[in-house]
Every structure is written in structure tokens, then in C-alpha cells.
Image (cartoon, grey):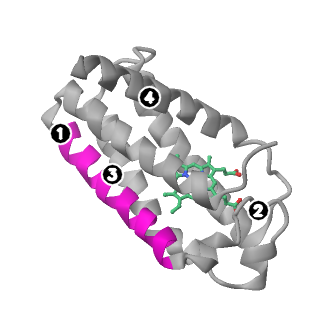
Amino acid sequence: MKFKFLKITTLSAAIMIGGFAQTATSHTGAMGIIKERMDNMVIMGKALGAVADMLKGKRDFDAGVVSQTGDVLIQHSKTMGSLFPDTEESRLGKYSAALPVVWEKNDEFLALAKSLEEKAEILKTVASGGDLKMIKVAFGQTAKTCSACHADFRKKKD
Ligand code: HEC
């Protein structure tokens, strides 16, 4: 029962990651800091997507790739705050999907970035243990943190 739930969570997380990758090409006109943060988000999406593919059996399991994904996410969650400065360009830049609430509730936004860093640390730690079940749980928690932030701080797609 517990395992079943875990499987569903992991799968829906994997589907969400698929959705992230799709948005990757739709913002070719973005510039400056908007482009920079979008690019970083896309890099995270791809890194997490590689793990999703492993969990879906689309690609061979490789603990090294899971660990690298952890590193990529740790690195980008650390710099995330600095890519959403409270400037006119950052708030009103063309093609940005960031909502004003990013700056209105900046503490919450930064806390979610920090939480992503922590989840990515766990993912990296369990990767070296090679226990697939633990990796699935850590993956699910990580992907949930991406979605939690997007749910509140990013514009919904039409
Ligand atoms: C703390 C909040 C937060 C976290 C955590 C977060 N994101 Fe984002 N993400 C955003 C915001 C805000 C945007 C919109 C940025 C913009 O358009 O200016 C975004 C945009 C994106 C985009 C679209 C980029 C584009 O080209 O338009 C992708 C892909 C993405 N995030 C993937 C991820 C993944 C994968 C994770 C987790 C590993 C993640 N994000 C974690 C806030 C977050």
C-alpha cells in the first residue's frame, strides 16, 4: 500500500518533469536576468529529467548521474535568490512568468529555494547508497519542491 502510493507519486513527479522540459523552448526572446534564471531552471529540469527517466526505466540506472543531478540542483538553488532581485527588469522583464508574489513574499520564496537545496542534498546522499527505493523517495520530495514553488510563484500556463 505504502509502496503503491510511492510509485504513483514518483510517476506523477516524473510527468511533471516532462512538462518542465517542454516549456524549455518557448522563451527564446527573453533577455538578461530573465533569460539567465530561465536557463538555470531548464538546466535543473533536464538534470531531474534524467533521474525521472531512470525511475521510469527509460534509461539504465546510474548512481553517478543521480549524484550529479543533486550537485546541479544544489548549485542552482544556492544562486536562485540572486537571480530574482527586486529590480524593475527582474519584476517586469519580457516573457517572465514570475509573479509579483516572488517579491511580496520574498522570505517564503527564498525558503523554498533553501528547501530545494536541502532536498537535493538528500538526493545526493542517497545516490551514493544506491538504494533505489530511497532514491525514489528523495526524487519525489525534490520534484515536489519545484512544483510547490511554481504553484505559488509562477504564472499558470494558458
Ligand atoms: C523558489 C521557487 C522555485 C523553485 C524551488 C523552482 N522554481 Fe522553477 N521557476 C520559478 C519561477 C518564479 C519561474 C519563472 C521565472 C521567470 O519566467 O522569470 C520558474 C520557471 C521554471 C521553468 C521554465 C523556464 C523557462 O524557460 O521559462 C522551468 C523549466 C523550471 N522552473 C524548472 C524547475 C525545476 C526542475 C525545479 C526543481 C528542481 C524548479 N524549477 C524549482 C520558481 C522556482
Q: CA distance from mark 1 to mark 3?
A: 13 Å
Q: What percent of the width, then of the height, locates residue 135?
A: 26, 33
The tag on residue 52 is: 4
Q: What percent of the width, then of the height, locates residue 30?
A: 81, 60
Confirm or reject: label 1 Cβ below 8 Å from ligand 1.
Answer: no
Q: Which residues are magenta?
A: 107-127
Confirm or reject: label 3 Cβ below 8 Å from ligand 1.
Answer: yes
The tag on residue 120 is: 3
Q: Amino acid at mark 1?
A: Ser
Tell me which secondary structure the magenta stretch mostly adopts: helix
Residue found at the very far bottom of the displayed protein: 87
Dividing the image into four quarters, tell me where ligand 1 lies: bottom right
Q: Are marks 1 and 4 in contact (CB under 8 Å)?
A: no
* Residue occupied by mark 1: 128
Q: Nearer the viewer, residue 18 or 28?
A: 18
Q: What percent of the width, then of the height, locates residue 145?
A: 43, 50
Q: Are marks 2 and 1 in contact (CB under 8 Å)?
A: no
Q: Amino acid at mark 3?
A: Ala
